[in-house]
């Protein structure tokens, strides 16, 4: 079975942890333990979040007086793909001896006229007070707002249209390679309508929606979205909270989940199932093997046969 695994940002940094390199290296062991059992039985493609990492780089770049302008998010996203990809390759190499493993810097095409560029919605990093006054002017495509955790950057999150390296990923899979790709939703780029030339976009693509698109392109059988809760819940965080164990795409969408947490995961699972007739699931990282075998998580299945 071909499985696309979307690792949440908590895979490398748990909530509240310092973003130190040693902390992330230690957490990778937990990731590889969860994935190794599946990789021994199935074709695996791994995508991953990069929220804490790109947020840290964005804040550092905005505060650096040596720069005339902060680095754009497309380049910062590429940096995080390299770092996280390297950590995953090294640890997977040790637990899956003899297996071909490759991390691929991946680009995701977005529309230059996507309305998201006019209405930023994606939070990126905690912004220290001394950078607040200068950051927006130094990179006009970003804004700073206050939420319950403090001042945070907010940037555009356009919809993924196409994954540039999809064919290369398919070829690597055909050669028996475990592929790590599309980190952070992929490096966002726009394509010239006449020449096809690619240009970076100062934005962040939702990694779960990119994972669903990638799984569709690769004709995957299963989309596995791993996060820090064991199930999708209705009325999450309230006395009425209830786990969703099994749902069709339509039933899942009726949950009206928060756009900054479970919403994109639910939508990604629903899209993949609707478009392919495959199976998607959402659940906890440590239960990855059990989720695929139907013993944990929230299963999303087709409501009607795909014609």
Image: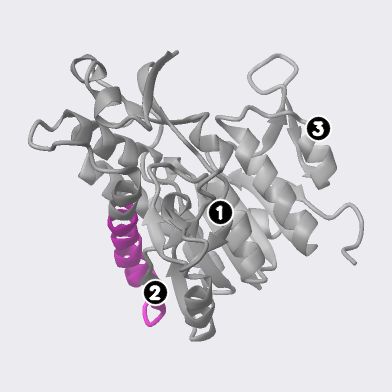
Magenta residues span 80-101
**Residue at left offset 49%, top offset 46%:** 205
Q: Position of residue 263 (x, y in %)?
A: 64, 35
Q: Secondary structure at mark 2?
A: strand
In the picture, the disc for residue 101 is 2
User: Going from the N terminus, do you reach mark 3 or mark 2 first?
Assistant: 2
**Residue that protrudes farthest toward the front in the picture:** 194
Mark positioned earlier in the residue sequence (2 or 1): 2
Above or below for 55 versus 216: above
Query: Which of labels 2 and 1 is toward the front?
Result: 1
x, y (%) of residue 156? 47, 36
Mark 1 vs 3, N-terminal side = 1
> To which residue does mark 3 refer?
254
> Pointer 1: residues within 10 angstroms few (<14), some, or many (20+)?
many
Q: Which residue is mark 1?
A: 210
Q: Is residue 93 magenta?
A: yes
Asked if residue 33 is among those painted magenta in the image, a careful observer would answer: no
> Is disc 1 placed on a helix, strand or loop?
helix
Residue 19: tell me if it is visible: no
């Amino acid at each position: 079975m071909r499985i696309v695994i979307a690792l949440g940002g908590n895979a490398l940094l748990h909530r509240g942890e310092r973003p130190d390199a040693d902390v992330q290296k230690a957490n990778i062991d937990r990731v590889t333990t969860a994935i190794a059992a599946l990789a021994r039985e199935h074709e695996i493609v791994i995508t991953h979040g990069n929220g804490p990492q790109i947020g840290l780089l964005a804040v550092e770049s905005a505060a650096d007086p040596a720069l005339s302008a902060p680095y754009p998010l497309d380049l910062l996203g590429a940096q995080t793909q390299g770092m996280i990809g390297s950590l995953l390759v090294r640890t997977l190499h040790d637990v899956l001896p003899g297996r071909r493993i490759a991390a691929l810097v991946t680009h995701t095409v977005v529309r230059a006229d996507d309305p998201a560029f006019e209405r930023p919605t994606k939070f990126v990093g905690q912004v220290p007070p001394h950078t607040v006054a200068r950051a927006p002017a130094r990179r006009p495509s970003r804004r700073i707002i206050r939420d319950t955790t403090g001042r945070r950057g907010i940037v555009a999150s356009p919809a993924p249209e196409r994954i540039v390296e999809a064919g290369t990923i398919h070829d690597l899979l055909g050669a028996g390679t475990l592929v790590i790709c599309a980190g952070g939703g992929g490096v966002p780029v726009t394509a010239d309508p006449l020449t096809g030339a690619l240009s970076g976009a100062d934005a962040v693509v939702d990694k779960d929606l990119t994972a669903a698109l990638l799984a569709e392109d690769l004709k995957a059988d299963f989309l596995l979205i791993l996060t820090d809760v064991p199930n999708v819940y209705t009325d999450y965080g309230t006395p009425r909270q209830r786990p969703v164990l099994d749902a069709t795409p339509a039933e899942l969408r009726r949950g009206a989940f928060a756009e900054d947490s479970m919403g994109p995961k639910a939508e990604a699972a629903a899209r993949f199932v609707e478009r392919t007739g495959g199976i998607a699931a959402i659940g906890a990282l440590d239960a990855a093997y059990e989720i695929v075998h139907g013993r944990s998580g929230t299963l999303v299945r087709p409501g009607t046969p795909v014609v």
